[in-house]
Image (cartoon, rainbow, N blue to C red):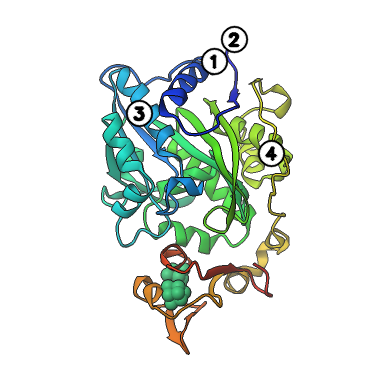
Amino acid sequence: MKYDVVVQDGFGFYCTKKIKQAISSMVESSGGWPEGTSRGSRVLLKVNMLSAKHPSRGITTHPAVVAAVASLLQDRGCAVAIGDSPGGAVKGVERYWKNCGFRAAAEVSGAEMVSFEGSGSKRIDKHGREYDIALPILEGYDCRINLSKFKTHMYTRLTNALKNSFGIVPGLGKAMLHMRSPRPVDLAVNIVDLYETADFALHITDGILCLDGRGPSTDGRRRHEGFLAVSRDGVCLDMVLSQMAGLPWDHLDSNVEARSRGLGKPFEEITVLGSHEFKDFDIPARSYLNYIPPWLGSVARLLLRTAPVANSRCTGCGVCKRACPVNAIEIKNGRAKMKKGTCIMCLCCHELCPENAIDLKLPFGRS
Ligand code: SF4
Ligand code: SF4
């Protein structure tokens, strides 16, 4: 029987050999390898490369999972590439490839790394909205596979298959999308547009090391959950994992937006093989920004959006100031000060601060 979603539990640690065996059988249970993965095909693995941190931090797709999938595809005779566009990579992606272990995963599996920043982009129209999309997503590959990380997100509550599509927009384009979508419900529209554009043929979730609480990056709490999940349908996958984690599937804006477009399936009709029991998984509350009426317009967008703020750990070193692409940071009295009106929320400062001294604050003192 073919299952819409396959979940396998019980992974104590990241072992490429064990993961490879498991994914091979999970893919079979979910309908087999998709079209575009036969001998001679070119396959792109879209990973989660959010932050240039060690894979043990639980922020990015673990290289053992990436290497396992790449190796399975190599065994089928495919040529494999690995890529993503991180949030703050205006200074180059090589640091991410090295620190996250993707470069090593490519080397052991015979895959190549592809830079979404360096490959160019193309502007597309999706449902009347414009997006700049990294070229490797639009051309050059017979199949794209989504290798997402399961974790919480302070803004969207959870992030997995659908939200992982956000990285198909290279460079600062992602920051501009955040700017034009001040409420999570608005961002969900963009997320689902990008998910449709990426047209992934297969989705594989790394849920072995996760984050809960203040995810999706360094502020999140690392959790060992020990599961992997596979599906041909990213919407079904997110609906099922959201529900398993304790958040009803229709409390996640991207799921609701996707279902409103007829994507995925009614929850009751999704067939699932296996399960994972989350214990005390701390999911952020629904953002109050969702209750702001959209007609408040651009003034509200500026006033109500999140902004980076340096906390008391700041040493005034100036790393963030040098990295900021729009000169929105000055060092005053030994502490970084971000100009909210100039900031484009690229998160380069948050990513690069050596002291982990930058909080992402919502207005009215919330964070
Ligand atoms: S990089 Fe961090 S520690 Fe250095 S000035 Fe900026 S906020 Fe402060
Ligand atoms: S201050 Fe804003 S624009 Fe500058 S690096 Fe930080 S997030 Fe990016």
Q: Quadrant of the C terminus?
A: bottom right
> Which tag, 1 or 4, sits closer to the chain's start?
1
Q: Residue at x 72, y 55 (%)?
A: 285
Q: Write down the residue under mark 1.
A: 29
Q: Secondary structure at mark 4?
A: loop
Q: Residues within 10 Å of mark 4 (few under 14, many from 20)?
A: some
Residue 116 lies, with reference to residue 40, above or below; the image says: below
Whether pointer 1 and pointer 2 mark residues with C-beta atoms closer than 8 Å, the reply is yes
Could you tell me how far apart the alpha carbons at marks 2 and 4 are, in whole angstroms?
25 Å
Q: Residue at x 31, y 40 (%)?
A: 104
Q: Residues within 10 Å of mark 3 (few under 14, many from 20)?
A: many
Q: Secondary structure at mark 1?
A: helix
> Which tag, 1 or 2, sits closer to the chain's start?
2
Q: Write down the residue under mark 3.
A: 70
Residue type of the residue flagged with mark 2: Met
Whether pointer 1 and pointer 4 mark residues with C-beta atoms closer than 8 Å, the reply is no
In the image, is 188 to the left or to the right of 286?
left
Could you tell me how far apart the alpha carbons at marks 1 and 2 are, in whole angstroms?
7 Å
Q: Quadrant of the N terminus?
A: top right
> Which tag, 3 or 2, sits closer to the chain's start?
2
Q: Nearer the viewer, residue 261 or 289?
A: 289
Residue 282: x %, y % from top left = 70, 49
Q: Write down the residue under mark 4.
A: 245
Label ID, residue 1: 2
